[in-house]
Amino acid sequence: MKQHLLIIRFSALGDVAMMVPVVYSLAMQYPELRITVLSKPFARSFFEDLAPNVNFMAADIKGEYNGMKGLNSLYRRLVAKQFTHVADLHSVLRSNYLRLRFLMGHFKVQHIDKHRKDRRRLVKPHNKQRRPLPAQQTNYMEVFEKLGFPIKELTFKSVFPAEGGNLNMLPKAIGPKCYWEQWIGIAPFAAHQGKIYPPEKMELVVKQLTEKYPKCRIFLFGRGKEEDRYFKKWVKEMPQCVFVGWHLENMHQELILMSHLDVMISMDSANMHLASLTNTPVVSVWGATHPMAGFMGYKQKEENCVQLNLDCRPCSVYGQKPCIFGDYHCMTGITPEMIVGKVDAILNKVQQTDK
């Protein structure tokens, strides 16, 4: 019987994006292994054309497969696919239940070690144990090794060829990239306040960049009420700015655009991971969270991180905890010049490479 691996991960956009380099490398190293990724519908664009032996299966766990009855229905559907191995890369209630069903069915099953105790030690209020945790990709690779599929190295570079995605697939408002332009992406928002650089200060970053690079184009990524509020103002005041959400329809188009950026400025958020999948350097801004928790963008350099060395950091693995001091100094204390300086360093390298 041909080996068929099921990979389960139902989580948020960034966590699923971090799977891509690992799944690609696994598929390339084991071309005879059939791989099916089970995730939320949004993840289809990540895996559908990733490799010839990788398939994608969408599961609406809040709709069709909601609750115990829904999970049982999903399990029956999965069993019909004749999997031989199951990798639970999520390890939450839903995936734990499916994993238990597969174990009872005598399948070969392994799950991710989230290092929860080490995470708690890292973020506790006092006497933190500041030791870098394994990168999330390393955690994923360990699961496959336990199943008998060790990955020698991560060979993934980008979801696109070296020249980037096809800009002709984007609306005319984006247009071609002129050789004299610097394309800069900015994704200034995140799910939690502890991971958001104050918008008023980010506006100063944008202004400094437009003054320093008058021929640049700044693409503003993100969709939501806060994005609408601030991006409309920035676009009106600074003609170099483009509100991406006004022009692009889906994540695949955004990935195409990201692949042509010279640099992306992002919080510890999904956009950091999306840009990483296009081999674009990211200036990442960290507040309540910290790169040592293992969630740095794929192959991003720590020298491009912007963060303050505070005794209270990190206070949260995911950034959802309120600031114990109430002022979020980990973010408000970062100056616009610190961010612009990191961008300068990357753009200078780009210019030297082009010469």
Image: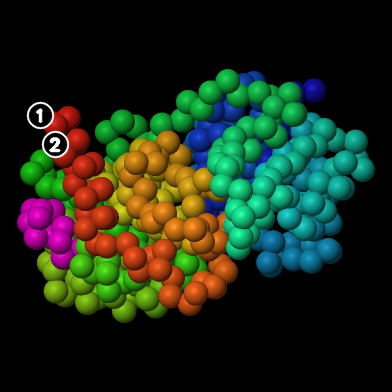
Disc 1 to disc 2, C-alpha distance: 6 Å
Q: Residues within 10 Å of mark 2 (few under 14, many from 20)?
A: few
Which residue is at a point 42% across and 54% down the rendered structure image? 309
Q: Quadrant of the N terminus?
A: top right
Residue that mark 1 sits on: 355
* Colouring chosen for the image of the structure: rainbow
Q: Position of residue 315 (x, y in %)?
A: 55, 61
Q: Position of residue 247 (x, y in %)?
A: 28, 63
Q: Position of residue 37 (x, y in %)?
A: 63, 42
The type of residue carrying mark 1 is: Lys
Residue contact at pointers 1 and 2, CB within 8 angstroms: yes
Give, as a single range, the part of the protein colored magenta: 206-216
Q: Quadrant of the C terminus?
A: top left
The quadrant in which residue 160 appears is top left
Q: Main secondary structure of the magenta part?
A: helix
Q: Nearer the viewer, residue 287 or 58?
A: 287
User: Relative to 266, does residue 115 appear above or below in the rendering?
Assistant: above
Q: Nearer the viewer, residue 265 or 341?
A: 341
The answer to whether 143 appears left or right of 313 in the picture is right
The answer to whether 268 appears left or right of 355 in the picture is right
Which residue is at a point 43% across and 75% down the rendered structure image? 327
Residue that mark 2 sits on: 351
Could you tell me if residue 277 is visible in this image?
no
